[in-house]
Amino acid sequence: MLVFKKNIYLNPLRPRSPSGQKEFRDEEDPSPLPFNFIYKALSNAQNLLQEVNDMNDREVSNRLDILFPHATRLGGIKTLDDLSNQLFTGLNHNQTWFTMNCYHQCFLYDCLLDVVEDYSYNDEVERRELFPEMEGRALDFNRFLLQYFFNTTFLIAPERFNQMSPEERKQLLRAPDFGQDFPQLKRFSDPEDPTLAKVINSVPPGPEEMTLKALEQNPYSV
């Protein structure tokens, strides 16, 4: 199970009336069910990566740049395939909670963005097929990111990030340590997540950085 700012494994639907059986989305929350959204994005990514694997070598690079505009800077098809498998396995693991580093978050962001673009350009019938709970409404991706991602600092341009002072970097928000302050974001006195600078500067992940970090307890019960 993957850890986000809010628990994606809880169903946020609520009954239309105390005695009613039908459930509906909060009209002020224009986003699909978080688990459905992430599952669809990662499933779609695995299918796309398989298609790319079947292409000629000359076509692979251009296709990856289109499908994964941020994550493709981190490595080739094998790196993206490994990140995809790590995240999909972690998402569906029902006994252990896993935290993601910036490599995982960057790849997932691209996966979600691809689905958002697909949904946005579809007509209402196709939208309902993709996310029935949305009832064809527009999808607010920024709202989803604010609600479920701890931050998106991995998207900062390298030119800007590399010019920041140590003090400025300390102001960047990162995922909490799942202590007493969870789930609020907080400022850390120690340096930023070590994978952040690597992702921003397109440094390929090492074996340990490809692996999700398992937690010993449920972070949402703290």
Image (spheres, rainbow, N blue to C red):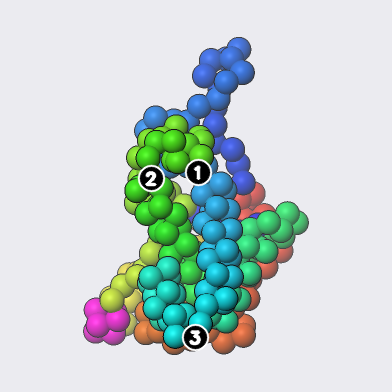
Q: Mark 1 points at which residue?
A: 130
Q: Nearer the viewer, residue 113 or 10?
A: 113
Q: Name the residue under label 3.
A: 57
Q: How far apart are marks 3 and 1 (CA)?
A: 31 Å
What span is colored magenta in the figure? 158-164
CB contact under 8 Å: marks 2 and 1:
yes
> Up-down: is 156 above or below 205?
above
Q: Mark 2 points at which residue?
A: 122
Q: Residue 192 carries which label?
A: none
Evaluate whether residue 77 shows in this view: yes
First in residue order: circle 2 vs circle 3 = 3
Pinpoint residue 45: horizontal percent, then vertical percent. Answer: 53, 64
> Up-down: is 46 above or below 103?
above
Q: Which amino acid lies under the numbered mark 3 shown in the image of this protein?
A: Asp
Q: Which amino acid lies under the numbered mark 1 shown in the image of this protein?
A: Leu
Q: Is mark 3 on a helix, strand or loop?
A: helix
Pinpoint residue 98: horizontal percent, then vertical percent. Answer: 63, 64
Q: Which amino acid lies under the numbered mark 2 shown in the image of this protein?
A: Asn
| Residue located 55% across and 25% down the image | 23
Question: Is the magenta region chiefly helix, strand or loop?
Answer: helix
| Residue located 48% across and 69% down the image | 107
Q: In which quarter of the image is residue 10?
A: top right
